[in-house]
Image (spheres, rainbow, N blue to C red):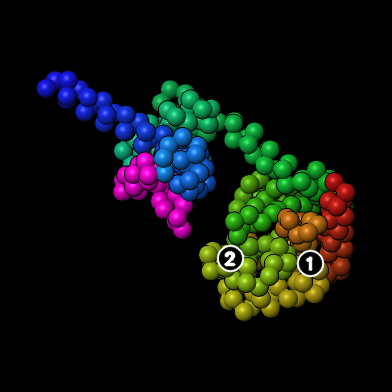
Amino acid sequence: MDGTNGDGAGRMVQTARTTFRVLDEVSARERAGVTELATALEMSKSAVHRHLATLVAEGRIEKHDGEYRRSLRETEGLTAAFAVVEALKGLSGATPGEIASELDRSEATVEHYLSWLERNGYVTRRGDVYKNGLKFLDIGERVKYDTGIFDIAAEQVDHLAEESGELALLSVLEHGQNVLLYKASGNDAIQTAHEIGLREPLHCSGLGKAILSELPRDQVERIVDEHGLPVFTEQTITDREELFEELDRTSDRGYAIDRQEAKPGIRCVAAPVVTEERELYGAVSVTAPKSRMQGDRFEERIPELVTGAANVIEVNSIYL
């Protein structure tokens, strides 16, 4: 009797181990078919089918068009870990209890993710207070240079700041938003909250409208559907058709104008930057107080500087 029970328990353990092997094999691929899995695992297709059925029933994998892939449930832990990272960014350092309150999760759960993040170098700890670590700086710097144009673009932005005496910016399009990649300050530059990595809607700034002017209408429609047209000042464009009329004017003249649409009292001139084969959309700009953005300087001198810088970046990107 005892031996029979032992054999049954052993078979259950072995079955569980095999099921987890199948799960690991599916997780290692974007998607996989039964034949592919059977070959990799050196199992019969019927046996693989049985284990896949168990994993589908338990919600660990999903079946699509005859192939299998890891379910979204398997990535929930990753989502929670990034939620902790975002909370730390907003709080500029916090205790597990403060993060738990911010995320509406238990403190024990937050401590679990903090422990994993700390072991892998993504957060640091001093006493009970956790902060995001410098590993993110390494990742961010690599991403910045991987755009392929950062070096030549930064040089031109520095030149723009020097020539104009104002604040010069470089941004790129990512996930339907305007992301600030680099900035340089001339002798008279204003001090703003433009931090590197800042994400903003595209419709309310010169940089954003310059980028939108280069995109197909259906892509702009999708961006507006997702992010809307929120109000920032009395001058912000909040009507879809008015936005498209503005983008047409931007495309015709070759540069965008921000008439205090993002921040009161601030004007901006921006030109689009599109690399060869349109692999990267970005823009460069000069931003200054309204009092210094008037007349010929606003209508001719600054646009010439900005469009010239954008053109140099585009040409150099071909030979980079």
Is residue 169 one of those drawn in magenta? no
Q: Which residue is mark 2?
A: 223
In-image side of 194 versus 31 (left or right): right
Mark 2 or 1 closer to N-term?
2
In-image side of 210 versus 124 (left or right): right
Q: In the image, is residue 132 above or below residue 290?
A: above
Residue 265 coordinates in the image, percent (x, y)? 67, 63
* Residue 245 appearing in the image: yes
Q: Residue furthest left?
A: 1
From the viewer's side, name the closer residue of 59 and 47: 47
The image quarter containing residue 286 is bottom right
Q: CA distance from mark 2 to mark 1?
A: 20 Å
The residue segment tinted magenta is 46-74
Q: Which residue is mark 1?
A: 255
The amino acid sitting under disc 1 is Tyr
Instruction: Give me the residue at 78% from left, 59% from top.
Output: 277
Q: Secondary structure at mark 1?
A: loop
In-image side of 239 versus 118 (left or right): right
**Which quarter of the image is occupied by the N terminus?**
top left
Instruction: Give me the residue at 70% from left, 75% from top.
Output: 246
> Which mark is on residue 208?
none
Whether tag 2 and tag 1 are in contact, CB under 8 A, the answer is no
The image quarter containing residue 2 is top left
Binning the other alpha carbons within 10 Å of mark 1 as few (below 14), some (14 to 19) or many (20 upward) gives many
The amino acid sitting under disc 2 is Ile
Instruction: Give me the residue at 70% from left, 48% from top.
Output: 181
Q: In the image, is residue 232 above or below residue 80?
A: below
